Image: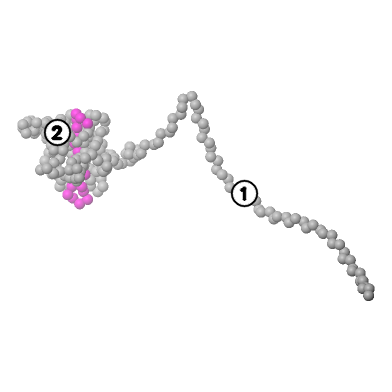
């Protein structure tokens, strides 16, 4: 699964925005400038549009959002500056959990194509569980929006994104666990100086004195 990163401070600011506008939905953007995520809030004018023209805008601000056009234009211009990118559009769901609804997908499209194919759509909600946040991006092979992994960065997020520790095996009831054997460091054996091997004492051989050969005369 593809993954996108968001700073924990930016995510906290988005949840703060959502709780301030509750029960209405909030909306905004995250601009990354110089490697720093900056949250830019939009005014949700959906309630005003619904009040003025309910036939064309049947949903109110509790179930839909429309960014204030001038605020959206300012963010798009800021994202065109060197070293700056438009990373996220975000909005909240006040009644349901964080998911990319059919209404959300319709607003993210323009004339059959994604309006911002390089931008990630972030949906946050407290309705189903606290601090629920999910991210979605346009997937060209499937020609549809698909969920991507959301990685929260920052010092406090290391423990959240860390791999869980392996659980220790449970002990059977009534049995005491055997203490783990202690490993004693092996000491290097002291090398004793090699002792010279003693040669066995040579056995003294008694040499018999040579006997003089007697001269014998041959008899004729």
Q: In the image, is 45 to the left or to the right of 164? A: left
**Quarter the C terminus occupies:** bottom right
Camera-nearest residue between 214 and 198 = 214
Along the polypeptide, which appears first: circle 1 or circle 2?
Answer: 2
Highlighted range, magenta: 79-97
Crowd rating for badge 2 (residues with CA inside 10 Å; few <14, some 14–19, many 20+):
many
Give coordinates of residue 119: x percent, y percent. Answer: 19, 44
Q: Looking at the image, can residue 156 be seen?
A: no
Q: Of all residues shown, which one is farthest toward the bottom?
A: 220
Q: Quadrant of residue 163?
A: top left
Q: Quadrant of residue 68?
A: top left
Q: In the image, is 110 to the left or to the right of 149? A: left
Give coordinates of residue 202: x percent, y percent. Answer: 78, 58
Residue labelled with disc 1: 190
Color scheme of the displayed model: one colour
At 15% from the left and 47% from the top, the residue drawn is 77
**CA gap, disc 1 and disc 2:** 82 Å
Q: Which mark is residue 64?
A: 2
Q: Check residue 86 for magenta coloring.
A: yes
Crowd rating for badge 1 (residues with CA inside 10 Å; few <14, some 14–19, many 20+):
few
At 39% from the left and 36% from the top, the residue drawn is 165
Q: Looking at the image, can residue 79 be seen?
A: yes
Give coordinates of residue 134: x percent, y percent. Answer: 24, 37
At 19% from the left and 40% from the top, the residue drawn is 145
In the image, is residue 105 above or below residue 211? above
Give coordinates of residue 75: x percent, y percent. Answer: 16, 44
């Amino acid at each position: 699964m593809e993954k996108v990163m968001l700073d924990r401070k930016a995510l906290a600011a988005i949840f703060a925005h959502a709780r301030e506008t509750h029960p209405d939905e909030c909306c905004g953007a995250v601009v990354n400038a110089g490697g720093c995520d900056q949250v830019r809030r939009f005014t949700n004018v959906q309630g005003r549009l619904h009040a003025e023209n309910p036939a064309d805008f049947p949903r109110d601000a509790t179930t839909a959002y429309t960014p204030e056009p001038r605020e959206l234009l300012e963010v798009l211009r800021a994202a065109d500056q060197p070293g700056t990118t438009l990373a996220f559009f975000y909005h909240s769901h006040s009644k349901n959990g964080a998911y990319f609804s059919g209404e959300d997908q319709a607003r993210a499209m323009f004339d059959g194509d994604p309006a911002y194919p390089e931008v990630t759509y972030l949906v946050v909600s407290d309705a189903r569980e606290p601090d629920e946040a999910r991210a979605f991006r346009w997937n060209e092979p499937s020609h549809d929006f698909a969920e991507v992994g959301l990685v929260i960065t920052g010092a406090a997020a290391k423990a959240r994104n860390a791999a869980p520790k392996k659980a220790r095996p449970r002990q059977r009831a009534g049995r005491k666990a055997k203490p783990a054997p202690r490993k004693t460091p092996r000491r290097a054996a002291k090398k004793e100086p090699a002792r010279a091997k003693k040669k066995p004492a040579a056995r003294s051989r008694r040499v018999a004195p040579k006997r003089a050969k007697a001269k014998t005369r041959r008899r004729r």
